[in-house]
Image (cartoon, rainbow, N blue to C red):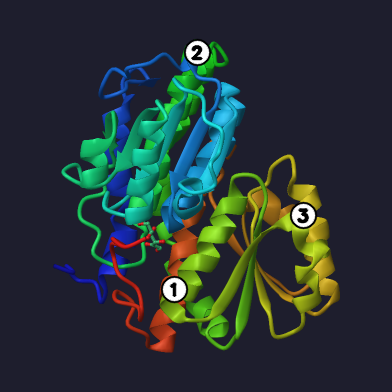
Amino acid sequence: DKANYRHFMAKEIHEQPEVVGHTLAHYVDMATEKVAMPVKLPFDFKDIQRLSITACGTASYAGFVAKYWFERLARLPVELDVASEFRYREAPLRKGDLAIFISQSGETADTLAALRYAKSQGLHTISVVNVPTSTIARESETALPTLAGPEIGVASTKAFTCQLAALAAIAIAAGRARGELSETDETKLVHGLIEVPRLMTEALALEPQIEKLARDIAKSQDVLYLGRGTNYPLALEGALKLKEISYIHAEGYAAGELKHGPIALIDEKMPVVVIAPYDRVFEKTVSNMQEVAARGGRIILMTDAQGAREATVDSLVTIILPDMPATVTPLVYAIPVQLLAYHTAVVMGTDVDQPRNLAKSVTVE
Ligand code: F6R
């Protein structure tokens, strides 16, 4: 039931503070601010030399964010694949290493095939799944749940942020086990995660501003999304979300790649959504935005108060989010990204919950 919302997607976007809170409560101890895995893992993170993360679509972008986390927090090298490629590219895998599979439905055929392949190669397997009775959950060595509740809208929203919440906790656990994070680091990181539901509620309050912006986006033929670091995968997710429900063509790029090609597309007609909280690479993103502005491109900047002050760029609309630790930005910035796609689709009059040609669960390879 859609409660008082016009679409399931809107309801599911708004449920995120609650379901991300539930998911976090499953992985961290709120009182001590330490990671608390729901099950004992059948391996030691110290013995893992390489982590392979595999998924499809939006789940693969959650995996892409997690790659940054595992590498930075646990110094664990990560290979990320879309499942349709992982299964067939004959990657050299080391017996005893770990593979993580991420899937909302737990029934995605390519992801399942990749899981079976990893098992046949003697890897430990973890699935991060939203449906605990699913095939992928049953066939993986360890199934770790997201507690998003049923996701009805075909475009994934709350499952994505719950995947991020679970993966962040697993990355912190890995960092601790590998001796890369101190107890104080752990507490700081977990504290940041616990703040996410509140930060998401604040981000949801930006909806009226985003709704207005969507009317403008709806007039465009193409939209570019840029981000750096963990917000680069979020740029990919923003572009996917927009194209699948509004049918407006969109591309996500690492902001630094702009001048290696996509800048040729920029003109007055192309909005550029820049996802850039103020951080150590912000200055570099400002120069990318100046390049866009110099070519007449219109910029929508999702940032924080400091970012808004430091962004010395013309023709800029800023969406200002609260301050937060860098680690959690992809979870919270997902909200304005999803709302922008949603409201653009509503303006376009598309079937938001059942976009054409798409199925909620893709059970053929
Ligand atoms: C996009 C979307 C898809 C799914 C993908 C994987 O909004 O929903 O890209 O993320 O088909 O599905 P699951 O997570 O069920 O394996």
Q: Earlier in the sequence, mark 3 or mark 1?
A: 1
* Residue found 58% across the figure and 73% down from its top: 250
**Which amino acid does the dot numbered 3 rest on?**
Gly
Q: Quadrant of residue 308?
A: bottom right
Q: Earlier in the sequence, mark 2 or mark 3?
A: 2
Cα–Cα gap, marks 3 and 1: 25 Å
Numbered mark located on residue 244 in the image: 1
Left or right of 49? Residue 157 is left
Do the numbered discs 2 and 3 sit on residues whose CB atoms are within 8 Å? no
Numbered mark located on residue 256 in the image: 3
Q: Label 2 CB, ligand 1: below 8 Å?
A: no
Cα–Cα gap, marks 1 and 2: 40 Å
Quadrant where the image shows the C terminus: bottom left
Circle 1 SS class: helix
Whole-percent x and y of residue 84? 46, 54
Q: Label 1 CB, ligand 1: below 8 Å?
A: yes
Q: Which residue is mark 2?
A: 46
Q: Is residue 130 above or below residue 339?
A: above
Judged from this view, the residue extending furthest toward the left is: 1
Whole-percent x and y of residue 58? 44, 56
Do the numbered discs 1 and 2 sit on residues whose CB atoms are within 8 Å? no
Label 3: few (<14), some (14–19) or many (≥20) C-alpha neighbours in 10 Å: some
Q: Quadrant of residue 279?
A: top right
Left or right of 83? Residue 69 is right
Cα–Cα gap, marks 2 and 3: 34 Å
Whole-percent x and y of residue 259? 83, 63
Whole-percent x and y of residue 60? 47, 50
Q: Is residue 261 visible?
A: yes
Nearer the observer: mark 1 or 2; the answer is 2
Circle 2 SS class: helix
